[in-house]
Amino acid sequence: MKILIIRGVHGKTMAVQLGFWMKALLSVCLFGAPLSIGWYLGTLYSPEVPEFFVDLSDSLEQDLANQRQQLQDIEVDSQRSVRALGVHMADLQSRLVRLEALGSRVAERADLDTDEFDFNSTPALGGPVAPVASAEPLSGDLARQLGDLETQLASREMQLGMLSSLMLDRDWRDASSPSGLPTTAGWISSRYGMRADPFTGEQAWHNGIDIAGREGAPVLAVASGVVSHSAQSSSYGNMVEITHDNGLVTLYAHNKEVLVEQGTIVHKGQQIATMGTTGRSTGPHIHFEVYKNGRSVDPASYIQRTIR
């Protein structure tokens, strides 16, 4: 590197050859000094600049951390909402299953056409295609729809429950009306009314009918009701009295063994005793009586009945 030195306006020009170390020293003087002076002046008169950038960085990191936490909270709330929605849907589905079972039972008891009232099949639906405002309903709309569905299910459950109760009441009334024989086998050996007494041979009033059979044969309740009397007497032997609806009472006498106690609820066709010959009896049979509002009636009219 050469440096030209001019002496005066019309002076001579002199060239000076610089070596490596002179070049380095000259570069430091020309460039390093101004930079050093600028840095010094910057730190001297603006000491707050580095702290500002540090605070800004800390603030951005805090905002980012807050946003991450908000996203986590939103995710947790969404998962909770999905779980709650799943539980609610499961509850509605279980109630729908119970509703279908109840509807099927009511339809069966009401003798409805199973092809027309099939609660186990998907209901027939149809209609033209209608445009929808949105493919995905809002969460508020979804909650409202679920609420409406739950209200409809509750209403249907109440209606079918009341109908089922009425059907049960009707079934109980039918079951509590005496009909049929009080045993599975046997024959009528003596009818209701006047007859010759089997011990004295004199004419006497017979207050029921006698059904002869095998000792130990089952004695059955001819209707549902409550055992109002279960005891032993010299005339009836081991006897059972059952009170039914509509002022009806049935009596079963001369049993070998009584299987029910007073206060027991019995159902139509249930075994209540075994056939015997206790009390005033000449052999194994059932002495069967029927009372209507406290007055003795002929059991034959009830034996011939069939429940429809």
Image (cartoon, grey):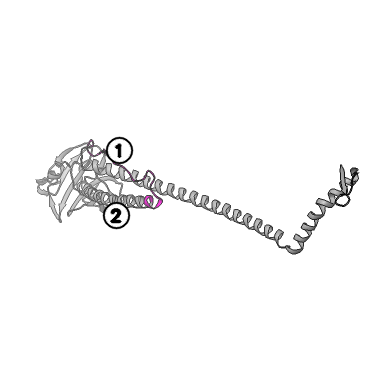
In magenta, the rendered stretch is 114-142
Q: Relative to residue 201, is residue 51 drawn left or right?
A: right
Mark 2 neighbour density, 10 Å: few (under 14) some (14–19) many (20 or more):
few
85 or 162, which lies in front?
85
| SS majority, magenta | loop
Residue at (88% x, 49% y) in the render:
11
Q: Amino acid at mark 2?
A: Gly
Quadrant of the frame with the C terminus = top left
Q: Relative to residue 79, is residue 38 drawn left or right?
A: right
Specify the label residue 263 is tagged with.
Answer: 2
13 or 273, which lies in front?
13
| Residue 145 is at least partly visible in this image | yes
Residue at (77% x, 57% y) in the render:
38
> Magenta span has 116?
yes
Q: Are marks 1 and 2 in contact (CB under 8 Å)?
A: no
Residue 284, image quadrant: top left
Q: Nearer the viewer, mark 1 or mark 2?
A: 1
Disc with the residue nearer the chain's start (1 vs 2): 1
Residue 288 on image: x %, y %: 18, 46
20 or 230, which lies in front?
20
Residue 126 on image: x %, y %: 26, 38
Q: Amino acid at mark 1?
A: Thr
> What residue is disc 1 on?
122
